[in-house]
Amino acid sequence: MNRYTINNIKLTLDESKEELIYKIAKKISKKTSSISDIEILRESFDVRKKNDIRKVYTLNFTTDKQLNLNPAINREYKFPVAELDKDKKIVIVGFGPCGMFTALLLAQMGYKPIVIERGKHVDERTADVHRFWNDKILNEESNVQFGEGGAGTFSDGKLTTGIKDYRVYKVLQELHRFGAQDDILYRNKPHIGTDVLKNVVKNIRNEIIRLGGEIKFSTRLEFINIEKLENVKTTSDGSSKIKSIIISDANGSQELACDKLVLAIGHSARDTFKMLIDIGLEASRKPFSIGARIEHPQSLINIAQYGSEDIAEILGAADYKLSYRASNDRGVYTFCMCPGGEIIMASSSNGQVVTNGMSYSARDGKYANSGLLVDVREDDFETDDIMAGVRFQEKYEHLAYDIMSGYNFPTTDLKNYIGSKLEKCLPEFYSKSIMEALPNMGRSLRGFDAPDTVLKGVETRSSSPIRFLRNEDYESNIKGIYPAGEGCGYAGGITSAAVDGIKIAEKIVL
């Protein structure tokens, strides 16, 4: 028997997946009886012709015939072959996607990693988040940014990624195994939804514990003890290594011996950034983006993309992705688009307003929202030090809090944006850039720049403003320390962060 991959198999919206075998047979000019074991690798939608929208598939299938097609894509993950060192003391800081998948892979290979997470487990964390949203009582250690599952838990659970890495399917498989929907394995733009994702991360946690790992919630990394290495010939090899870490919880502080430390700290762990810089971990400043959330009726997006609101009942709420290069050479783009979602307050420090978007699995809310962001460059920073980008973020987060007298969204519609409180909460280059970009985006997506379109701010946490440097083995200048994931500047979303975590685990054991 032979197994192949075939592309560009199309179905109309009225045709079911059972028709795929007939479409394959027609394309290869063989009988359906010779075709078996059809596997959907990818499903997307061709909406260019609004009156003839098609579902488009890439498939693996088996046949007893010899064909002039590519051999079937094998997506199964192969664990690295390494001798198990049970005495290796591995600690992972942070239990977002990166830290979670580092711990999961290590546990699957027989190690017993210890995870420390400054936030709470997802049930207690959810209660703290809702207390903040309802009563504006912020817990700085348990919020939208900190806690089990990381910042992605309170988003949309979007799994789209621009990276091309065979480990992506390993991530999707594990998320599916622990409770995510079947279609994340093949949808072009897979998502889980905040409501489902909460159970998924809980199930992964329980699996890590079952395999011998340990998760310590409400536990902070306070300090890293390092020691000098002898007989180091070059500075690039590193002249020091990790010895132990100091952690703290409700019972006080304690020292933990540590051979390998994975820093999956997330993009909002600003106090940890400072501590790492102070102990000598090499880092650089990194560009990021700033802006606001733009909100439309979901029906407007559905009609603009599908030509009919009825199509959304079949394909789901429509999304979009737009970009524009302004005459000031600033990139303007939409980010983290949430169909049928809501705009949420995502602060993690007192006196700072931070905005984000979130959707549930059904994506059945009345509104769509997306970040409308503009590039921030290093020459926008007011100082030259490593933490300058952090202070840039904090400046506008504090400004929004002060202008709004608390945890309230500075809000306006487009026709009243100039002179609004929101405009005052953002850099001048932002306003100039979006005022030029919006009409152009409106030509790409009808109604996007309608005068009554709502903007809410401020959004500052699209990515980390710092990158902690690492070598080809993913190790920092201090041996045994592995900067990882989005917070350390090496990922941009749930999937890429999880993949980075898997890579770190591979490097640790080899």
Image (tube, grey):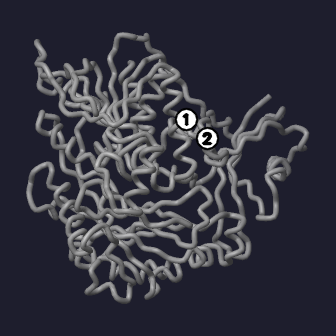
Give coordinates of residue 15: x percent, y percent.
82, 60
Total numbered labels = 2
Where disc 1 sits, the SS reads helix
Residue that mark 2 sits on? 179
In the rendered view, would you say 244 is above or below 86? below
Give coordinates of residue 408: x percent, y percent.
33, 71
Q: Quadrant of residue 398?
A: bottom left
Give coordinates of residue 197: x percent, y percent.
53, 47
Local crowd at mark 1 within 10 Å, few (<14), some, or many (≥20)? Answer: some
Query: What's the residue at 42%, 19% (across, down)?
Result: 112
Marks 1 and 2 close (CB-CB < 8 Å): yes
Q: Which mark is residue 410?
A: none
Quarter of the image for the N terminus: give it. top right
Residue that mark 1 sits on? 203
Q: Identify which residue, 113 or 136, lies in the foreground.
A: 136
Give coordinates of residue 151: x percent, y percent.
40, 50
> Would residue 260 appear left or right of 333 to someone viewing this image?
left
Query: What's the residue at 26%, 46% (across, down)?
Result: 269
